[in-house]
């Protein structure tokens, strides 16, 4: 690894660690500053101030906020994210249980979005001004304008209620958890919902980036050498045009995970998003912190990897 | 500015988007006059009626007129949308212009804070704050602004970064203009087209976020209708009364599409060279 690149990567890792620290401080502060606490949810109904004080003491919420944060951060650094206030289960195990379905959903949506968006973006750029370009523009504009939860409900209405071809919710049918076919059928609608929203921005960036690449000298040279249109586009222009698309994919992760919250709610999908929504309503602070720390880490690491991957994809980029 | 206006008028999608937005704004403003019934007027004998001459968009599970609730719902969605966007623009523009103009440590500090806000999915953060501090229209708007200022700051910063190196800014400094004057009269005034376009696109986003929050039960509280909570109420009747969830969602879609079309057309009108790029 070149010395310039090494110091850049080290600097970025340092920034990433600082950002994680900042995110955790902000989230912790927001939760502790909020009026009320988890005692009302844990006891349910009316309760005496003594009972509330006992619960706060048991959960360690009676200590100064700074001490609470230090205790939490110290344990988190050792890999212990604490126990759920509500169930007493380890937060790590709750997250691990829900991680699989969320990865399945988000990865599926990302793959679907890229597989559809890149060819459509290429078509729109190569056939600029034609009907393909109009279709591409319409798809990208519609995609960013749909509320994801409504799109999901409309897909349920069409495919489950009217056509009766796909199941409306859940990870699988009861007793059919091991059946791959059943699980795949349950995956289609949530993946489509999340993927269609993501597809719009990928398509738009592929188109504009390819248009830019097609104007470069090396493309003109390739054409002058007598190469066919397909080879010029796919082998020369697209390889360079995909570099900004990689960034957009990296930057789209927060939107993707945020979109998963609503999609999981619409389709009763037992993932991280639903875990977070439930934890927020129940004021289950350790679960909220654990989930958000995980999501922020994934986003920060993905952005770091995207930046570092650049130097391997595009040698023109220098790091100082 | 006049040339920009005529370029905008000549674009079909700009007119279409602007028209859709104008209709929604007028509908929201005149809701008490336009809506055929009150938003909470119930008639259990009329529940789950399909669209008809009496109830153009049908009735919901409590026998309330869906059209009237969609009309009233536009008020809530647009009010939160405009309030949140306004706040986000003020904070984002101030932070972004300071970062771009002063550079150095100020830039690094502001942009790292912005990066922190960008690294947590907006909906997660909004969900936490609204659920813990209470779901009111003001809280919802405030917290949407809290998570949408960072992208605005980024755009304004990059515009100010490029503008501050221009000759007219050096000339203003040479003539003795202070930081505040250079920032407000020279940088921000020239960055105005970018800020206007950003506003239009942000309005669509804030309406989408608000509707998502309402869907999760954290936006406007019943019986006050918002498009998001109407969709969630319609979800349980999807098999028997498709219209309850369909029309409010369609209203969100048309409004956001309108803002996006108008924003795109504005961007092209301000800078026609972009037209072939995006």
Image: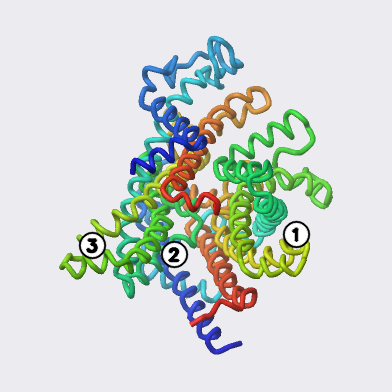
- Report in which chain the residue with disc 3 lies: B
In the foreground, B10 or A194: B10
| Nearer the camera: disc 3 or disc 2 | 3
- Report in which chain the residue with disc 1 lies: A
Residue at the spot 34% in from the left edge and 66% down from the top edge: B100
Residue B177, located in which quarter of the rendered image? bottom left
Q: Tell me whether the residue at label 3 lies in contact with that at label 2, contact meaning CB atoms closer than 8 angstroms.
A: no
Mark 1 vs mark 2, CA separation in Å: 44 Å
Residue under pointer 1: A229
Q: Earlier in the sequence, mark 3 or mark 2?
A: 2
Q: Classify A308 as above or below B34.
A: below
Residue B116 image label: 2
| Nearer the camera: disc 1 or disc 2 | 1
- Mark 2 element type: helix
Q: Classify A111 as above or below A227.
A: above
Residue at the spot 56% in from the left edge and 10% down from the top edge: B53
- Mark 1 element type: helix
| Nearer the camera: disc 3 or disc 1 | 1
Residue B236, located in which quarter of the rendered image? top right
Residue A299 image label: none
Residue under pointer 3: B182
At which x and y percent is residue A77?
52, 75
Mark 3 vs mark 1, CA separation in Å: 50 Å
Q: Tell me whether the residue at label 3 lies in contact with that at label 1, contact meaning CB atoms closer than 8 angstroms.
A: no
Mark 3 vs mark 2, CA separation in Å: 29 Å
A271 displayed left or right of B106: right
Q: Quadrant of the N terminus of chain B?
A: top left
């Amino acid at each position: 690894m070149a010395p310039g690149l090494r110091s850049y990567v080290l600097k970025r890792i340092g920034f990433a660690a600082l950002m994680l620290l900042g995110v955790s401080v902000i989230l912790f502060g927001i939760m502790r500053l909020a009026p009320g606490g988890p005692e009302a949810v844990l006891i349910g109904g009316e309760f005496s101030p003594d009972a509330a004080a006992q619960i706060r003491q048991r959960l360690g919420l009676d200590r100064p906020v700074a001490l609470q944060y230090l205790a939490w951060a110290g344990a988190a650094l050792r890999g212990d994210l604490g126990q759920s206030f509500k169930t007493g289960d380890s937060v790590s195990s709750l997250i691990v249980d829900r991680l699989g379905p969320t990865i399945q959903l988000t990865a599926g949506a990302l793959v679907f979005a890229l597989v559809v968006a890149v060819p459509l973006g290429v078509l729109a750029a190569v056939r600029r001004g034609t009907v393909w370009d109009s279709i591409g523009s319409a798809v990208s504009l519609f995609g960013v304008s749909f509320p994801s939860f409504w799109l999901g409900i409309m897909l349920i209405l069409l495919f489950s209620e009217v056509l009766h071809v796909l199941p409306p919710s859940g990870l699988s049918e009861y007793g059919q958890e091991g059946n791959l076919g059943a699980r795949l059928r349950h995956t289609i609608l949530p993946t489509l919902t999340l993927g269609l929203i993501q597809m719009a921005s990928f398509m738009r960036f592929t188109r504009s980036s390819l248009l830019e690449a097609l104007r470069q000298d090396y493309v003109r040279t390739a054409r002058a050498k007598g190469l066919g249109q397909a080879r010029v586009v796919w082998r020369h222009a697209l390889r360079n045009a995909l570099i900004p698309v990689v960034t957009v994919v990296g930057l789209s992760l927060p939107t993707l995970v945020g979109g998963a919250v609503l999609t999981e709610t619409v389709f009763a999908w037992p993932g991280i998003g639903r875990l977070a929504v439930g934890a927020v309503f129940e004021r289950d602070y350790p679960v909220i912190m654990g989930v958000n720390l995980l999501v922020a880490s994934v986003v920060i690491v993905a952005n770091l990897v995207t930046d570092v991957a650049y130097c391997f994809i595009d040698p023109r980029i220098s790091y100082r | 500015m006049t040339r920009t206006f005529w370029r905008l008028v000549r674009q079909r999608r700009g007119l279409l988007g602007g028209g859709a937005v104008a209709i929604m704004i007028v509908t929201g403003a005149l809701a008490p006059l336009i809506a055929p019934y009150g938003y909470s007027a119930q008639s259990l004998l009329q529940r789950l009626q399909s669209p008809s001459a009496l109830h153009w968009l049908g009735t919901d599970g409590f026998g309330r007129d869906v059209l009237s609730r969609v009309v009233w719902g536009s008020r809530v969605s647009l009010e939160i949308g405009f309030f949140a966007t306004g706040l986000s623009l003020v904070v984002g523009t101030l932070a972004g212009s300071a970062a771009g103009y002063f550079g150095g440590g100020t830039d690094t500090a502001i942009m790292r804070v912005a990066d922190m806000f960008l690294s947590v999915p907006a909906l997660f953060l909004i969900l936490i704050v609204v659920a813990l501090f209470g779901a009111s229209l003001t809280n919802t708007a405030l917290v949407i602004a809290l998570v949408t200022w960072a992208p605005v700051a980024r755009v304004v910063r990059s515009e100010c970064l490029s503008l501050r190196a221009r000759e007219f800014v050096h000339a203003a400094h040479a003539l003795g203009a202070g930081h505040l004057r250079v920032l407000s009269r020279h940088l921000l005034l020239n960055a105005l087209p970018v800020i206007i376009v950003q506003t239009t696109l942000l309005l669509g986003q804030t309406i989408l976020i608000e509707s998502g929050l309402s869907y999760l039960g954290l936006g406007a509280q019943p019986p006050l209708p918002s498009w998001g909570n109407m969709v969630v109420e319609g979800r349980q009747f999807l098999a028997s009364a498709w219209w309850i969830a369909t029309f409010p969602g369609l209203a969100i879609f048309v409004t956001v599409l309108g803002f996006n079309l108008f924003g795109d057309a504005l961007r092209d009108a301000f800078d026609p060279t972009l037209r072939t790029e995006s």
